[in-house]
Image (cartoon, rainbow, N blue to C red):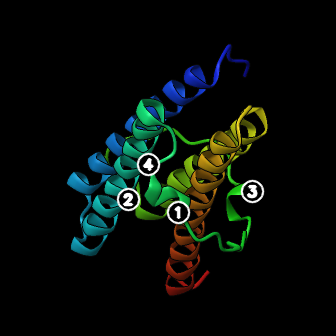
Amino acid sequence: MEFESLDDVVEFAIQKEVEAAEFYSELSREADLAGSAKMFAEFAEEENKHRRMLEDFKAQGIAASIQDYQFKWITDIKRSDYVVDLEYQKGMAYHEILLLAMKREEKALKLYNEFQVQADTEAGKNLFKILCQEEAKHKLALETMYDDYMAQMGD
């Protein structure tokens, strides 16, 4: 993807975070299990946090709280690398929802990696590096949940 400015990139990323929050909110409302509903609601709030981070960056540059962000290596177990794209449908099985969600997080991670490379300021690079790490955390959590669920099912 090509953008004319960092502002365009940030605006596009804001829209992606809004979509992600709406996706997880819908999953939360439709989840059969209380634990799943809570988990998806927490993911929605995380995506809203990312949106606010992007909006703050656009309005005033990198916030002080972001400057103190602690980077940590997030393991990639690469489950989503072997998943085809799925489209959400009401009534999907739990494992299918996890596959769909982990694929979405994989795409978000790749997108933010691309944006990090394209950013023309150190603050922009740091913002997208933070978002990469956040999406990598989500991806790992979903892939781990998927592995745990499949192990319980005997796979």
- Please rate how many residues cluster around mark 3, counting C-alpha atoms within 10 Å: few if below 14, some from 14 to 19, many from 20: few
- Please rate how many residues cluster around mark 4, counting C-alpha atoms within 10 Å: few if below 14, some from 14 to 19, many from 20: many
Report the amino acid beneath label 4: His
Report the amino acid beneath label 1: His
Report the amino acid beneath label 3: Tyr
**From what the image shows, is residue 49 above or below residue 89?**
below
Give yes or no for contact between labels 2 and 3 (Cβ–Cβ under 8 Å): no
Element on which disc 2 rests:
helix
- Please rate how many residues cluster around mark 1, counting C-alpha atoms within 10 Å: few if below 14, some from 14 to 19, many from 20: many
| Label whose residue precedes the other's in the sequence (1 or 2) | 2
x 56%, y 42%: residue: 86
**From what the image shows, is residue 145 above or below residue 98?**
below
Q: Position of residue 84 (x, y in %)?
A: 68, 46
Report the amino acid beneath label 2: Phe
- Please rate how many residues cluster around mark 2, counting C-alpha atoms within 10 Å: few if below 14, some from 14 to 19, many from 20: many
Give yes or no for contact between labels 1 and 2 (Cβ–Cβ under 8 Å): yes
Residue denoted by label 1: 138
| Label whose residue precedes the other's in the sequence (3 or 1) | 3
Element on which disc 4 rests:
helix
Query: Where's the N terminus, which quadrant?
Result: top right
Residue denoted by label 4: 50
x 50%, y 75%: residue: 145
Element on which disc 3 rests:
helix
Q: Is 125 on the left or on the right of 46, as rendered?
A: right
Gap in Å between the C-alphas at discs 2 and 3? 22 Å
**From what the image shows, is residue 84 above or below residue 130?**
above
| Label whose residue precedes the other's in the sequence (3 or 4) | 4
